[in-house]
Structure formats: structure tokens, C-alpha cells
Image (tube, helix red, strand yellow):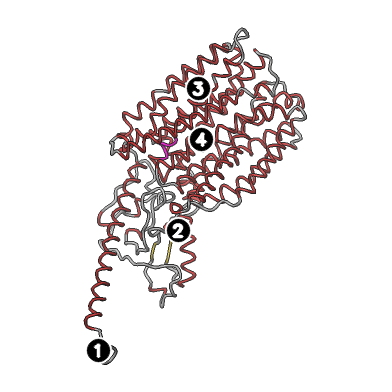
Amino acid sequence: MQCSDCTPPTSSLPHQALPSPELTLRTPSAAEDHTQRSSDSPRGHECRPEDATKTEESHQLEEGDTAVSDPAKSPRTIISFPRGDPENPYNWSTGRKMFILFQGIVAVVNSTLGSSLPSGAVDHLAEYFHVKSQAQLVLPISLFLVGYVLGPVVFAPLSESYGRRWVMVITFVFFTIFTMACAVAPTWSAFLVFRLLSGITASSAIAVVGGLYADIYGNPITRGRAMAFFMAATACGPVLAPSISGFISVLTWRWTFWAGFIIAGASLAFLCFMPETYGPTILKRKAQRMRRQTGNPNIFAPIELEKKGARQMITITLTRPVRMFLFEAIVLFSCLYLSIAYAIFYLYFEAYPLVFQGVYGFNAGTAGLPFLAIGLGAFLATGIFMYWDSVLIRAKKSNARWPQIEEYRRLPLACIGGPLYVISLFWLGWSANANVHWIVPTLSGIPFGMGFMLIFMALLNYIADAYEIFAASAMAATSACRSIFGAVLPIAGRPMYQGLGIPWASSLLGFLSLGMCIIPFAFIKYGDRIRANSTFCQELREKKQLLAREEKEREGSDASAQEEESGSAQDEEIGGRPPLGQGDEKM
């Protein structure tokens, strides 16, 4: 049995991301009754066998049981999902899961649409607010991405402490309000402040939706497909926004943000119906109901026994993404690769106007249309992902060994996406010439979108599979890191392209991306050893082993109880039948 001192205080409780979380009510051991200390640090500590008792009482308690005779003397019991529990999100219907999947996609599309919404209205913003500095004109997008840095490190851990639903809904309400505020901003400074606040609140969807899907999909293949749709949605918003803002801003730049507000408002009404998916929070509500129904105050969900407070929140919960970035090699190098790819993606909002308006003479609206090629590439990447999943399924059915290896399930996609991404950068740079038809550099967006999505799908799914219950914090770390790059690099984008020229500026980015390509290959070769030395992965393995042991013990106890009941029934049938004439007629 695992000492509670080795249990991280927040998201590492028995959770749907762990297999078969079907524990019945049980009385905690003495070790679990200790004041909890976090081992959710890179060091942690070892459990001492003498800290745990050798016996553990297990018993069933269902909702609707009568009140206990003496609650004060009742042992403290900890609940978890029994087998087949309809409240367990893993057991929800396919229709309900698809509803949640679509809600997550809607939230993400709104978030990413907002990120690049000013891109087609830059000239109109500059004229209205009398802004002449090119560095300042990058700020509406860059400050939004700064919000992507600040928000995830708060919202993802909060969702692992208080549940996904309210974190998602409340932040989306404020995102809608701040989008409207951008539309009515009286000054340039106010406009920039509202863009920052919009980015902070919009980041909740980016940080939490990955954990949302991990809550409801236990099968890695199904979860991977859900993440593929999530990632495709992240590409939809940025590539649609330039065309929307480019055409609408001809009327007035304010209508660009009124359009964003209308879309967000309609989406908010839909998101209000989102159910809670986080297992520990659902168990907490279940425990509260059972306490009311039975009158037993000693029924608890695991999350209720955690140590709470401001110190716990600051030192443990909110710092987890930072500690994962600093001390987890998988998270660190994934962050670096994803950050470079993400920054180049947002730098394109500076590069494309130089190419298609500067070289080919497009207007602001039509200059946004080449971004649609990137969206096409993203959807083609989703098709490749689905095909790879079918290969995985066939390999598993044939009992092949390679699908059981964590690194072989997703990372080969990044090994394809990386070179595609590099090729697209050189393609754009050396085809953007007035003597070359505009369709040629436009088509470079297809391998760019494919490479971008395959890199993200592979690495984010690899992180989710490797860290499971810590997935939201790991995703927050990657989100914050790539958003820093995405906010900073575009500021240097226009000077770089003007100084080096379009061919060599794109080539510089291509060589940088080429250096990053080695990371997924290195993970395939060394990933198992990296995970073996990971504090978070070790904790995850220990918890899985604990759940497996407790489930085995419970199944043994159930089998013994059934044998005893069968024996008692036989004894009653043999020794308890009334004599002839007292209840039976002679046949």
C-alpha cells in the first residue's frame, strides 16, 4: 500500500486517467490518515513500510443507505467509482462524449480566432489610433499571446483542484466581455489592455480542453483521436481570422471585434451546458450526497482529504507546470520544439502581408486567403493521424510488440511532420517572387499546415499518454512556453524579413526548424529511459500498481463473499426446510 505522504496533493488522486478506477468505499490506513505532504517535487521521498498498516477494512456503501446509528463511531471511508458506475465519465454514452468533444472544439476555435483577429485590421487600427511604429502594431497579437503565457499556469492547476466546468465557463464569460471591450476601446492603450485580458481568459480553453478529453476517454487511441480534432481546431481560428478581419474592417475596425463578440456570445450559450468531467470533483459531490442521505459525516472523496489553503495553492498547485518544465526532460524539449513551430506560425501573420501585399499587391482581405491553405494542410494532417490510428489498431489486434511501446504510438508522426515543416519554409522563401505565380507560395501553406499539425498532434499526445493525470499541468507548461515564443518572435519578424529579405529570412527559420527535428527521433530512442527517471512518471506507475492491487484484493473479497452466501443458502435449503405436513403436501 502506498503511503499518503507520497501522494501528490492535487491531480494525482485516483482519476479517470488511471485504468479501472473502480474502487469501493474503504477505510484508510494509518498512513493515509497522516497530514499529507507533497512528493510532487523533483525530489520527493521514499515511503517507509512501517508507515502503513498491514490491514485495511473494505466494505460497500451505496447511495440511499439508511443513516448510521452512531456517526461519531463510524470509521472514515473514502469513496471511488465502483465498476460500471454511470457517474464515471469513462462510462458515459458516446453521444454525451461527442457533445463534450464539440464543446471543447467550440471553445478552442473562439480562443484561437481571437488571437489573430486584428491581423487583417492592422492598417485601419494604425490610421484610427495614429500609430506609426511597426513594433507597436504587432502588440495586439503579441499581448494576446502573453495572456496565453499567464493564464494556463493558473487555470490548468485550478481545473485539477476544482473541476473543469466552472473554470471553462467563468473564463469564457470574461473572454466574451473583454472581446466586446476591444470593440469599444476609446484609446490605443485601452485597446491593448483589453487584448491582454482577452488573451488571459481565452487561454483557459487551450490549457484545460486537453485534460477535459483525458477525463472522458480512457482508451489511448480514442483519446488520441479526440486530441487530433482539438489540435485541428487550434489551427482553424488563426487561419480564418485574417480573412474575416480583412474584409470586415473595410467598414470599420470595430466591426472586426463585434463579429468576434457575436461568435463568442453564441458559443457561451452552448458552453453553459457543459457537464463536470473531472473525476475527483464528481466523487466529491457524490460523497456530499451520501453524507446527507446516510447521516454519516465520515464519508469522503479523496480530493476532500487534500491539504488546502493559499500556501498549498501557491507552492504546489500553481507551480506544478513550472516544475514540470524545469525538471521533466520530455516536457522541456517538447516545449522547445513546439515553441519554435508555434512562433513561426504566428510570425507568418507578419510575413504573409509582406509576401502577398508587398510582392503580389493583394489587399488586406485577399491577403488573408492564402492562410486557408494552411488550414487545408491541417485537415490533411488529421486524416494522416486517423490512418496512423488504424495502423495502430491492426498492429494491436495482431499482438505486435511495437504498439505497446509509448514512444512508437505517436512520435513517428512528428518524424514526418518535422521535415514537411522545414520544406514549406524554404518553399515559401524562394518562391515568393513577382516572376512566380502567387499560387506557388500559397501552396507552400499545405505542407506547412501538415507539418505544424503533425508535430503538435504527436508531441502533445505523447505528453498526455506519458503523464496522464498530470496532463493538464504538462499542457499548461507547453502552452505557456510556446506562447512566450509566439509573443516575442513576431515582434522581430518584420525587421528580420526587411533586413534579410524574404528568401533568407525564411531560410533562417527553416534551418532553425531543421535543428529541432532531431527531438522526436531522440525521444523514440531514449524516451523509455527518460520516463523511467521521471518523478511524475514514477508516481503514476506507483498509483497504477496500487489501484491494481486494491482491485485484485476487492475481487478476491467479492468472490469469498459470494462463496459464503452460496454456502449459507445451501445450508438453509437443507436444514431449514419445514417437516412434511407443516408446509408441504405429500405428492
The residue segment tinted magenta is 460-464
Mark 2 lies on residue: 86
Return the mark for residue 586: 1
The percent position of residue 457, horizontal first and vertical second, equals: 46, 33
Query: What secondary structure is the stretch in magenta mostly built from?
Result: helix
Q: Quadrant of the C terminus?
A: bottom left
Q: Quadrant of the N terminus?
A: bottom left
228 falls in the magenta region: no
State how far apart marks 2 and 3 are (Cα): 43 Å
Identify which amino acid the numbered label 1 is placed on: Lys
475 w.r.t. 558: above or below: above
State how far apart marks 2 and 1 are (Cα): 50 Å
The percent position of residue 415, horizontal first and vertical second, equals: 40, 25
Secondary-structure class at tag 2: loop
Nearer the camera: disc 1 or disc 4: 1
The percent position of residue 180, horizontal first and vertical second, equals: 71, 40
Identify which amino acid the numbered label 4 is placed on: Met
| Badge 4 vs badge 3, beta-carbon distance below 8 Å | no
- Residue 393, picture quadrant: top left
Q: Residues within 10 Å of mark 2 (few under 14, many from 20)?
A: few
Q: Residue at x 65, y 22 (%)?
A: 135
Return the mark for residue 447: 3
